[in-house]
């Protein structure tokens, strides 16, 4: 890959070249002005241009305008410390010029920021290489897609900014083509509109989404896009019928309308909106800020949610204008009593900023990409497990009951659940299931029924010891018998004739467990400095702010963040919130 730096300051140009070399990019040329840059582009095949704005002879804006006419296949990274308004105008100009890639790198920048933008360029190139063969579908294929059930949904999760809990999903239609594979709506939606099949598509997407979420037994909000053409039809009753079919609460369904569709409202569409709201269906203004809806229209229509367009989120942590626009959208949503969702969140700095701002819900690649239902089920299971973890630690005893005899295990579970101190009892029917439950949830009590084989009991005991379990482990026996040396130091209870007496013996043992601390306590895993960084991260502070507060450099902050994520097995600050809250809850727990 050949790179061109267009920068009149020789020191800055050389510094950038050295940083690029550190990233393994050695084919780099430097041009001091626009004229030299144009000449180099004629002589060499350039892939990526770093271009300063302020330069003598020919400024960067003029150069980029000329390159857009002659070399639109270039990738462009705008370098400058100029006013945000000028930088945004230049960025928008480059986007209109249809360059292969456009991004901004504000001076001064770190090598980490440089690496991020280079990575984004590589990703864009890979995506384009993968789709280099244009896909052209015909009307016949669209008709076949409906008749042969090629249409299906991906789901993009939405997360609560405060807790990190998954609270909803947006259903996004895809087409599973036998030759081209999974296709995005850009390849088939225009043809579906031409064939007047949008109503049929909407009901297919809704039907599949309601069925999928029903199979998950998931307490999630479902968002689906609805078009103006859908609202021109008698769409309300079919929607309610499908919700009834899958026993899906109507107040858990949100229909998303773009601003343009809001603006073009008709009597029929408004009647549909009114009826849908009457039945509890939520209505969202999608891509807010990019259309033509007036504030008076928004205040008169029965909307429940405002979805901020992702164009406002670009460079949000550093772009003052976008910060103000996003804040304005949030204030508008709050003033009208609307739930606020921000889409297009793609990095931690943006996520931290929005969380600190007080936005309700996050949607974007940073938290989760659109995914098939199988992947969503796995992600939801992990997310809900962590939410249950909070409840179990806060409320009392969280018991894993291991029993191979389902009748005996269920009887024990029912009796244990009658105890006030017991929050939840999860039954594992075999050793493998027990190991998985212990892996996923922070139990503070494990009860092994007498019907478990000695071999299974021994293996479970060894596993619990290896994981440094700090709760209480109790084995139930049918009668007094010799206990193997390996299990000698575990607590054993002989079952009574009356099940209630056995339960009281178990609870008596639980009462002896004082100041239980789960094995994942943060102060056991993290150093004092790592704990300080972790707490500042969940407060929404940036690397720079943390560095200033702790009197360390930003690179050291990044190192601490990497250590924290590695030690806790997490990938983002969003997941860190759950661990911090979990630790605070567990610190005050004692089972009495």
Image (tube, grey):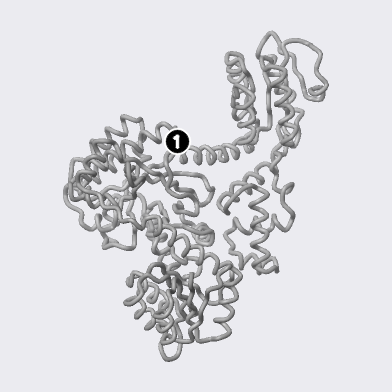
The answer to whether residue 191 shows anywhere in this view is yes
Vertical placement of residue 182 versus 483, above or below: below
Q: Quadrant of the C terminus?
A: top right
Q: Is residue 575 left or right of residue 96?
A: right
Q: Please tell me how many numbered marks the rendered image carries.
A: 1
Residue that appears at 70% across and 69% down = 551
Pick whichever, 504 or 224, lies toward us. 224
The residue labelled by disc 1 is 218
Q: Is residue 351 left or right of residue 497?
A: left
The answer to whether residue 172 shows anywhere in this view is no
Q: Residue furthest front?
A: 43
Q: Residues within 10 Å of mark 1 (few under 14, many from 20)?
A: some
Query: How far across and how far down the image is residue 375, in percent?
Result: 47, 40
Query: How far across and how far down the image is residue 505, in percent?
Result: 72, 19
Residue that appears at 63% across and 52% down = 565
Q: Which image quarter: residue 209?
A: top left
Residue that appears at 78% across and 24% down = 490
Q: Is residue 546 left or right of residue 327?
A: right
Q: Residue furthest top?
A: 497
Of helix, strand and loop, which one carries label 1? loop
């Amino acid at each position: 890959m050949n790179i061109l730096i267009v920068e009149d300051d020789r020191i800055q140009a050389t510094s950038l070249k050295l940083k690029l070399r550190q990233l393994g990019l050695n084919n780099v040329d430097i041009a001091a002005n626009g004229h030299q840059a144009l000449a180099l582009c004629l002589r060499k095949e350039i892939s990526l241009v770093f271009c300063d704005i302020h330069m003598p002879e020919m400024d960067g804006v003029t150069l980029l305008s000329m390159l857009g006419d002659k070399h639109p296949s270039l990738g462009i990274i705008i370098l400058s410390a100029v006013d945000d308004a000028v930088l945004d105008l230049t960025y928008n100009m480059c986007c209109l010029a249809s360059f292969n890639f456009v991004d901004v790198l504000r001076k001064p920048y770190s090598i980490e920021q440089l690496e991020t933008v280079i990575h984004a360029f590589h990703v864009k190139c890979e995506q384009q290489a993968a789709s280099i063969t244009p896909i052209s579908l015909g009307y016949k294929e669209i008709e076949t897609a409906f008749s042969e059930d090629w249409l299906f949904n991906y789901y993009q999760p939405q997360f609560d900014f405060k807790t990190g809990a998954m609270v909803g999903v947006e259903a996004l239609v895809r087409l599973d083509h036998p030759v081209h594979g999974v296709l995005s709506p850009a390849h088939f939606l225009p043809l579906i509109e031409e064939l007047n099949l949008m109503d049929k598509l909407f009901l297919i997407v809704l039907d599949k989404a309601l069925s999928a979420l029903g199979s998950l037994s998931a307490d999630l909000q479902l968002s689906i896009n609805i078009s103006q053409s859908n609202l021109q039809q008698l769409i309300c009753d079919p929607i309610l019928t499908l919700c009834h079919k899958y026993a899906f609460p109507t107040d858990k369904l949100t229909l998303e309308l773009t601003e343009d569709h809001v603006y073009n409202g008709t009597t029929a569409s408004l009647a549909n909106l009114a009826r849908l709201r009457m039945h509890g269906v939520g209505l969202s203004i999608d891509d807010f800020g990019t259309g033509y809806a007036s504030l008076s229209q928004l205040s008169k229509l029965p909307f429940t949610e405002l979805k901020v367009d992702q164009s406002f989120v670009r460079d949000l942590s550093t772009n003052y204008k976008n910060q103000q626009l996003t804040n304005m959208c949030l204030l508008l949503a709050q003033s009208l009593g609307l739930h606020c969702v921000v889409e297009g969140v793609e990095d931690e700095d943006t996520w931290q900023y929005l969380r600190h701002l007080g936005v309700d819900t996050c949607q974007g690649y940073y938290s989760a990409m659109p995914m098939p239902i199988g992947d969503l089920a796995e992600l939801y299971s992990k997310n809900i497990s962590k939410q249950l973890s909070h409840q179990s630690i806060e409320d009392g005893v969280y018991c894993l009951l291991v029993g191979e005899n389902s009748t005996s295990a269920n009887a024990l579970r029912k009796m244990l659940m009658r105890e006030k101190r017991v929050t939840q009892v999860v039954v594992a029917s075999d050793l493998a299931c027990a190991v998985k439950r212990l892996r996923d949830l922070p139990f503070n009590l494990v009860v092994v029924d007498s019907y478990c084989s000695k071999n299974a009991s021994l293996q479970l005991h060894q596993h619990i010891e290896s994981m440094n379990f700090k709760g209480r482990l109790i084995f139930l026996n049918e009668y007094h018998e010799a206990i193997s040396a390996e299990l000698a130091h575990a607590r054993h209870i002989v079952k009574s004739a009356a099940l209630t007496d056995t339960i009281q013996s178990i609870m008596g043992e639980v009462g002896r467990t004082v100041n239980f601390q789960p094995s994942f306590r943060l102060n056991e895993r993290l150093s004092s400095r790592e704990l300080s960084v972790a707490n500042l991260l969940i407060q929404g502070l940036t690397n720079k702010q943390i560095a200033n507060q702790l009197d360390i450099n930003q690179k050291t902050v990044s190192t601490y963040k990497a250590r924290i994520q590695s030690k806790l097995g997490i990938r983002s600050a969003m997941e860190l919130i759950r661990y911090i809250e979990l630790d605070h809850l567990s610190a005050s727990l004692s089972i009495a």
